Image: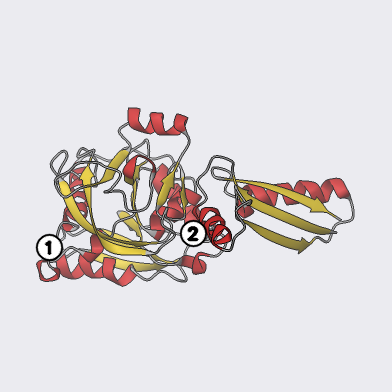
Amino acid sequence: MKAKIHVTLKPGILDPQGKAIEQALATLGYKSASNVRMGKYLELDLNETAREKAEAQVKAMCEKLLANTIIEEYRYELS
Amino acid sequence: MADGKSMNFGVIVFPGSNCDHDCVHVLSDVLGQKAIEVWHKETSLSGLEAVILPGGFSYGDYLRTGAIARFSPVMAAIKQFVAEGGMVLGICNGFQILLEAGLLPGAMLRNRSLAFICKDVHVRVENAATPFTGRCEPWQVLKLPIAHADGNYYTDDVTLSQMKANAQIVFRYCTPDGRVTSEANPNGSLDNIAGIRNAAGNVLGMMPHPERCSEDVLGDDDGRLIFLSMLDALKKAKLQPKPVMAG
């Protein structure tokens, strides 16, 4: 099974990189772009066929290492 | 100062630590203590009276600063050391590792300016009654260098008020005359926080580098106050009868 994981800063947490990207987009003329948030994307293969087990593992990985839940949130897709 | 009164310090070396030698130098050459480097694969801290997690870029800051170092084998021993009341100082990346390990509350965000900031700053001693600041006067202003890209301290409102109630905020960025202002905040840290301690009081994390300013020859020796305070506290603890530990 493949897991695709997105880790982003929680809403309300200052994202200075997102802000800088937003300003760069505005400079390029993309004035309609707003609320740019930058995050991380990870993908990994899991030697697991049972969806429930895979999901439990990915969740534990996110909680323990991949995201710092004080400042970040995560979501994932399994396929 | 090999008079039997010197203390045993351990400086943890992670892959990517780069302030370890500076810490050992200050402790041994400047202050005459015993300081050894402890490789992060070690699982025991026996014989050590205080531990320092130095600055650097452990594991290349991959994923998040300190996120991977916190799983180094030595961290289990450090948790045990802290639980037994041992004194631990985390400097810069060491502070980030202590946050990721949950030994201190909160987390670090990228600097507000996105820049890596390397310069002298001023911090005000908010709590001079800790084992790390005993040599400082309350509200004393220290000049210390910072060098980091992720020093923008964050925690939630509930934790912040608990920290305030427990006097856990030890250093705040300030102007040279001791005013805590937004302009004096180099990185966007919540409440100008530059250093905090845990609730029990035996763990301190700070972004500025006291080991880089502990000698007159460097033009600034304010950092020495931190190490001298630790020495005072260790000597005082040694004079007191030790509680009997189970096991």
Residue B3 - label: 1
- Number of marks in the image? 2
Q: Residues within 10 Å of mark 2 (few under 14, many from 20)?
A: many
Q: Nearer the viewer, residue B193 or B216?
A: B193
Which secondary structure lies at badge 1? loop
Q: Position of residue B151 (x, y in %)?
A: 40, 54
Whole-number angstrom distance, CA of label 1 to CA of label 2: 40 Å
Whether tag 1 and tag 2 are in contact, CB under 8 A, the answer is no
Q: Position of residue B37 (x, y in %)?
A: 35, 69
Q: Is residue B157 left or right of residue A29?
A: left
Residue B65 - label: 2
Chain of the residue where label 2 is placed in the rendered structure: B
Which residue occupies 33% across, 44% down?
A: B193
Q: Residues within 10 Å of mark 1 (few under 14, many from 20)?
A: few
Q: Is residue A43 left or right of residue B32?
A: right
Q: Position of residue B118 (x, y in %)?
A: 31, 65
Q: Earlier in the sequence, mark 1 or mark 2?
A: 1
The quarter of the picture where residue B191 lies is top left
Kind of residue at badge 2: Thr
Q: Could you tell me if residue B58 is visible in this image?
A: yes
Which secondary structure lies at badge 2? loop
Q: Position of residue B153 (x, y in %)?
A: 41, 47
Kind of residue at badge 1: Asp
In the picture, which quadrant includes the C terminus of chain B? top left
Residue A78 - label: none
Look at the picture and state if B120 lies above or below B25. Answer: above
